[in-house]
Image (tube, rainbow, N blue to C red):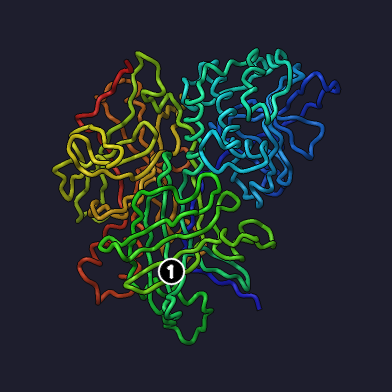
């Protein structure tokens, strides 16, 4: 008999949906093969019921030609939709990318990717992510393995970046080294009629493409070193995201649901369940923490026998949640294989020997690491088991000299985009004589829902890469973790070069928003505070755009849900005035509406659940931790912060 069962305390990621691409009437191709191609819109129109799969190109380029293999009558181009380059083809198609004008017989071939391999299972409202690295791999027939020009696939990607960078510099869309939206307009592509031959993979690999396309674009405007730097940044940008392990709701029978769980290797009755939040930054660091419950679960309702696979979730009220921190370390996933290729380490705050390591797993469908065959089947939409079992997520742990091991399902959400130079103004994105505002020094004020707890001020810096670190002062107190100095850190020690105070990588930015109709000049921020140095803020989550459903529920949004949501810094006054006099502000959002910015603490939330089941046996520390579950945010500029002019 089929049974419906609900895993308690569901944690569901809210993904920032990207707008689906538009449709429209299509134009037929020209019969003359030497006359080039005429294009229509940016592909099929995706709906929840059809097989059309929208996709996003990681480099924001509009006007990039592409063909869908099942459509022999039409040609398409990418369009910028909500600041990202989008297109769409049927989900089982192979998509061929190229640059060609209507009157140009010759073209620049950019490879053919198989949509079914990039996104095996269509997820409504979530475009497939196609990278320039995917295009380069398609052209060479092999994956890149290193960020070195000796790697043929990586070398081809550098060539693609160099071409697009040159287009941007020619259009004055960006300065060398900056990634900004560009448009391959009809006029630009028509000039390809001046080149003498097609550009194919071999030309991009051996460098001969530069001479072939010189009548069209002179790539010497962008030196090879700059192109390689941009390539590395783009590869790392594709790793940016929020990684969670979700307590999900399933309907069905014989489903092997494990999530982030396992057991002692010496006592199989002693089980472990866990939940985690991680984020990966633009410079390729991952930080965050996990909350874990361990023990022998007991079914307290003997009249209701339950599955052994569900019994472990009784630990949520029977075992105290313990926090393990992941100090900023190399990215969770290898940037080329999207696999865990080296242990990702969590440690308890008071021990260097009690460690938990994520040891293997591969990102499937661009969205999930599956810990089991059942989960892999659900993620990929296939019943074929992988031959390489290292794709399954696994972990191991040493806890009080006892060894544990298990499986883990991970969900990736909230990718990042380029940062609009009209908002993200750094010395690297503005011209000589122009003002720039990043690195941006700010003090974030954490207010607590429990008003008996005093607010805490934390100094932060959003650096020129778009990542976030602390700016803790030399005389920090429990309620003031901000510095009155706007100084730099040593790249190797990460200590303040002036004060000597240790600083910490704590977050990154998602996007820079710029609109004029409803003035919005803002940057979204994401932070995880996972270190005892943060005191009452240890465990705080900010801007991750997730909802914590902390009581049994079948949906998100009820009374059981804590939704801290997204967070943005509004820089309108700073950019318009080019002075700090009127400061900045911080808000969340709900659709198009600005709301009060909020934060939450996963560790504290789960402590409240435990406390509710043990009301008469709690320590002061347990009560205090639960009281720090959530709050609102404020922001101010420190007096040391100044807007600078590029010399």
Rendered residue at 66%/26% (across/down): 203
Task: Please give the count of numbered marks on the rendered protein.
Answer: 1
> Regarding mark 1 in the picture, which secondary structure is present there?
strand
Q: Image height check: is 380 above or below 613?
A: above
**As drawn, 254 above or below 139:** below
Q: Which residue is at a point 20% across and 67% down the rendered structure image? A: 620
Please provide percent x and percent y for residue 165: 54, 23
Instruction: Please state the horizontal and vertical placement of residue 350, each as a whole percent of the image.
Output: 25, 63
Q: Nearer the viewer, residue 477 or 288?
A: 288
Residue 354, picture quadrant:
bottom left
Please name whichever residue, 209 or 163, is drawn nearer the observer in this view of the structure.
Answer: 209
Residue drawn at x 42%, y 83% is 300
Residue 408: give x, y in percent of width and height.
49, 63
Residue in front for this viewpoint, 376 or 196: 196
On the rendered structure, is 378 left or right of 625? Answer: right
Q: Among all residues in the image, which is located at the extreme front?
A: 150
The answer to which quarter of the image holds residue 263 is: bottom left
- Quarter of the image containing the C terminus? top left
**Residue found farthest to the bottom:** 303
Q: Is residue 231 left or right of residue 640?
A: right
The percent position of residue 212, horizontal first and vertical second, equals 67, 18
Task: Give the labeled residue for mark 1.
Answer: 273
Q: Does the image show residue 561?
A: no
Which residue sits at x=39%, y=63%?
356
Residue furthest toward the left?
Answer: 475
Taking the image as drawn, is residue 349 in sight?
yes
Side (left or right) of 260 relative to 531:
right
- How packed mark 1 is, by other alpha carbons closer than 10 Å (few <14, some 14-19, many 20 or more), is many
Q: Above or below — where is 509 with respect to 338?
A: above
Quarter holding the N terminus is bottom right
């Amino acid at each position: 008999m089929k049974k419906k069962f609900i895993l308690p305390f569901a944690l569901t990621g809210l993904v920032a949906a990207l707008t689906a691409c538009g449709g429209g009437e299509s134009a037929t191709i020209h019969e003359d093969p030497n006359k080039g191609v005429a294009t229509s819109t940016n592909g099929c129109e995706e709906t929840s019921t059809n097989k059309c799969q929208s996709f996003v190109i990681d480099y924001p380029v509009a006007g990039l030609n592409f063909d869908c293999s099942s459509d022999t009558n039409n040609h398409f181009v990418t369009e910028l939709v909500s600041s990202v380059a989008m297109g769409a083809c049927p989900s089982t198609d192979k998509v061929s990318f190229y640059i060609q004008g209507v009157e140009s017989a010759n073209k620049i071939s950019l490879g053919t990717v198989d949509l079914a391999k990039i996104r095996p299972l269509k997820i409504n409202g979530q475009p497939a992510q196609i990278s320039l690295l995917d295009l380069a791999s398609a052209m060479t027939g092999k994956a890149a393995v290193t960020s070195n020009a000796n790697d043929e696939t990586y070398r081809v990607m550098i060539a693609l970046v160099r071409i697009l960078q040159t287009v941007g510099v020619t259009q004055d869309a960006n300065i060398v080294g900056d990634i900004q939206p560009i448009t391959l307009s009809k006029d630009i592509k028509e000039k390809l009629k001046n080149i003498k031959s097609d550009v194919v993979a071999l030309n991009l690999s051996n460098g001969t493409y530069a001479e072939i396309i010189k009548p069209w674009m002179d790539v010497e405007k962008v030196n090879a070193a700059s192109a390689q730097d941009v390539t590395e940044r783009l590869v790392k940008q594709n790793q940016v995201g929020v990684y969670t392990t979700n307590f999900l709701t399933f309907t069905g029978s014989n489903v092997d649901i494990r999530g982030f769980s396992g057991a002692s290797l010496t006592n199989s009755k002693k089980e472990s369940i866990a939940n985690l939040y991680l984020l990966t930054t633009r410079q390729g660091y991952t930080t965050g923490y996990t909350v874990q419950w361990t023990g022998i679960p007991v079914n307290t309702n003997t009249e209701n026998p339950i599955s052994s696979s569900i019994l472990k979730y009784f630990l949520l009220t029977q075992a105290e949640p313990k926090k393990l921190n992941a100090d900023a370390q190399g990215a969770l996933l290898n940037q080329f294989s999207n696999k865990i290729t080296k242990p990702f380490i969590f440690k308890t705050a008071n021990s260097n020997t009690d460690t938990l390591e994520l040891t293997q797993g591969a990102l499937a469908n661009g969205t999930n690491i599956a810990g089991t065959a059942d989960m892999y089947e659900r993620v990929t939409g296939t019943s074929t088991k992988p031959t390489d079992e290292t794709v399954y997520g696994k972990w191991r742990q040493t806890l009080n000299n006892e060894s544990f091991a298990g499986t883990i399902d991970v969900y990736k959400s909230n990718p990042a985009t380029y940062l609009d130079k009209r908002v993200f103004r750094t010395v690297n994105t503005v011209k000589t004589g122009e003002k720039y505002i990043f690195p941006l020094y700010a003090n974030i004020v954490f207010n607590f829902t429990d008003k008996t707890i005093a607010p805490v001020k934390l100094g932060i810096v959003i650096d020129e890469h778009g990542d976030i670190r602390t700016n803790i002062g030399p005389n920090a107190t429990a309620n003031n973790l901000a510095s009155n100095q706007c100084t730099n850190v040593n790249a190797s020690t990460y200590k303040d070069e002036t004060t000597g105070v240790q600083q910490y990588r704590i977050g990154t930015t998602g996007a820079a928003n710029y609109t004029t109709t409803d003035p919005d000049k803002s940057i979204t921020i994401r932070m995880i505070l996972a270190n005892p140095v943060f005191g009452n803020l240890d465990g705080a989550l900010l801007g991750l755009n997730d909802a914590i459903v902390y009581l049994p529920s079948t949906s998100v949004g009820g009374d059981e849900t804590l939704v801290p949501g997204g967070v943005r810094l509004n820089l309108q006054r700073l950019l318009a005035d080019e002075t700090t006099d009127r400061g900045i502000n911080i808000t969340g959002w709900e659709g198009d509406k600005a709301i009060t910015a909020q934060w939450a603490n996963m560790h504290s939330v789960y402590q409240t659940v435990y406390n509710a089941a043990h009301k008469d046996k709690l320590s002061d520390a347990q009560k205090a931790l639960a009281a720090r579950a959530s709050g609102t945010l404020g922001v101010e500029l420190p007096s040391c912060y100044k807007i600078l002019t590029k010399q």
